[in-house]
Image: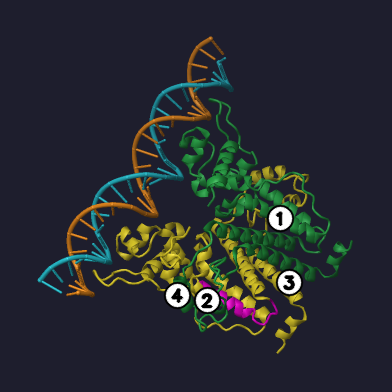
Chain colours: A yellow, B green, C cyan, D orange
Amino acid sequence: MVDTTETGLPRAVAVAWGMQETPQRGPSRGLSHERIVAAAVRIADEEGLAAVTMQAVAKSLGFTTMSLYRYVSGKEEMLQLMGDAAARLSEKVTLDPDWRQALRQWAALIREAWRAHPWLREIPRGQVSVLMPNQMRLADLGLQALESLPLTRDDKIGVILVVSQHVASMTELELALAQEGQLTVTEEGAAMLKEVITEERYPHVAPLYQAGDYSPGSTASPPATDEPPVENVEAEYDLGLDLIIAGLESRAGGAAETATRH
Amino acid sequence: MVDTTETGLPRAVAVAWGMQETPQRGPSRGLSHERIVAAAVRIADEEGLAAVTMQAVAKSLGFTTMSLYRYVSGKEEMLQLMGDAAARLSEKVTLDPDWRQALRQWAALIREAWRAHPWLREIPRGQVSVLMPNQMRLADLGLQALESLPLTRDDKIGVILVVSQHVASMTELELALAQEGQLTVTEEGAAMLKEVITEERYPHVAPLYQAGDYSPGSTASPPATDEPPVENVEAEYDLGLDLIIAGLESRAGGAAETATRH
DNA sequence: ATACATAGAGTATGACATACACAGTGTAGT
DNA sequence: ACTACACTGTGTATGTCATACTCTATGTAT
């Protein structure tokens, strides 16, 4: 449960849109939402989200921990604001007229944001995020990319969602792998693994390990995954995008072709 | 950096495969990895991952907090073990001979796991997860589903990865929405929103809000998103899967047909 | 002027993860 | 048997967090 204002809107949303009335009386304010969020983002970029504590943020601004609570109802709200701040887009983005290219461009934009702010993966997403200004801008741009496609409104939204999640997943994976560094398994360790990864229990995976090139590689969800060497995330990123686009082409049929011409 | 054993294998991996030598001397053990992990999973299922504290787990087993550290090197390791435990699969799963169906079945299996253990989304994934027994089983099954497709080994792995991430994303989204509950925005709040979501800045999104059906609906990544009413996640799940499968069909060309041909 | 809403500081509290030292326990080696 | 000691689980302590509450100083509306 997000905490909300009297308007029913989540506080974070109201704040992000600047809908919060500013007090008339009292001492002048030394802080602001913007400065707090900016400081928090800076710390997250440099030292990871774990380093973003209320104390660290306050200290970096030269204020007391508790002073932040004048501007932000709690850490969660701050995180939500950070999430939106990280999704800021340069005002002028021109998308290719071909929807395929446009979709790729759009995906690349999102990817860029994720790469610049790896910690985004750790902040909880929810209904709130959609209502935030920058996130909404991204969604808007995504819809624009698909404009020429003969899909229902809902399908377009779905495509946007699916694509953005794909990009998010792959970037997250990429970063997770980069952070952990390559595991260096001993001869002995590898041997032990070979012993347990038997042909009977793992008929399709076992060959990969028996082969000897046990690059423990990447991973996935609790669901499954694989073992491609780290750099391959790029390949997976493209693969997914290619499949989705190919899928869209076949679904859109001839109509899509029209959009491509000229 | 995961902490590893002398074999170079992450401790969690060694533990999960039962590669850890058990002591010979000393009092008999009252606890075990399995019991600890099982207790932790139970708590997570019932009260969410946040409720999984070392103290809570220990208490639920009738032991002291610190006793857990005899079996588990730290909370992170425990979480990794929980992740694998939640990916356990019933031994006998039969996949449809048609790869399309098989892929759907496989996706459904993963989805089931996510739904049963929503907290999975919160546990960090990485190289380690791939090396865990149950996760590996899932990967194996995924490869089996794609067996008949004329793809390279790497592409198959990629597909598995992409699909599993898609399922993960959609299930995560579904759960996030369910947890937050529907936002109930006041007339006033809605009006304020309409005012800031202008046609100029949000040409494609604005109409959705102006229309009056401001179901704040779902969300996506820091990237973009949409506003379909909650139940629509199902639609997005299908959409993504359909697109990927259609993409695979067009990529695999005639060969895929063969596999389908009844 | 003056009252009072407000800003930021100070202090306090309660979760947590985890380090460390100890007391009891059962087995290996005699 | 006996004994040493590897190992078990406990108790206590520490440091990091988020956040509640209280107080003093501040500036604006009256």
Q: Point out the image quarter for the C terminus of chain B.
A: bottom right
Q: Label 4: which residue?
A: B192
Kind of residue indicated by mark 1:
Ala
Residues A21 and B144: in front is A21
- Tell me if I can see residue B2 in this picture: yes
Report how far apart the C-alphas of labels 1 and 4 lie in the structure.
41 Å
Say what secondary structure mark 4 lies in.
Answer: helix
Kind of residue indicated by mark 4:
Met
The answer to whether residue B254 is left or right of residue B117 is right
Residue A95, position in %: x, y?
Answer: 60, 82
The chain containing the residue under callout 2 comes to A
Seen as rendered, the residue at the extreme right is: B262
Range of residues picked out in magenta: A135-151
The answer to whether residue B169 is left or right of residue A200 is left
Residue at 77% in and 48% down: B93
Residue A148, position in %: x, y?
Answer: 67, 82
Residue at 87% in and 64% down: B258
Say what secondary structure mark 1 lies in.
Answer: helix
The chain containing the residue under callout 4 comes to B
Report how far apart the C-alphas of labels 2 and 4 lie in the structure.
17 Å
Say what secondary structure mark 3 lies in.
Answer: helix
Residues B175 and D18: in front is B175
Q: Main secondary structure of the magenta part?
A: helix
Q: Which mark is residue B108?
A: 1
Report how far apart the C-alphas of labels 2 and 1 lie in the structure.
33 Å
Residue depth check, mark 3 versus mark 1: number of the one nearer the observer: 1
Residue A18, position in %: x, y?
Answer: 40, 73
Vertical position of residue B97 compared to residue A30: above or below? above
- Tell me if I can see residue A190 in this picture: no
Residue depth check, mark 4 versus mark 3: number of the one nearer the observer: 4
The chain containing the residue under callout 1 comes to B
Q: Decide which of tag 1 and tag 4 comes sooner along the chain.
A: 1
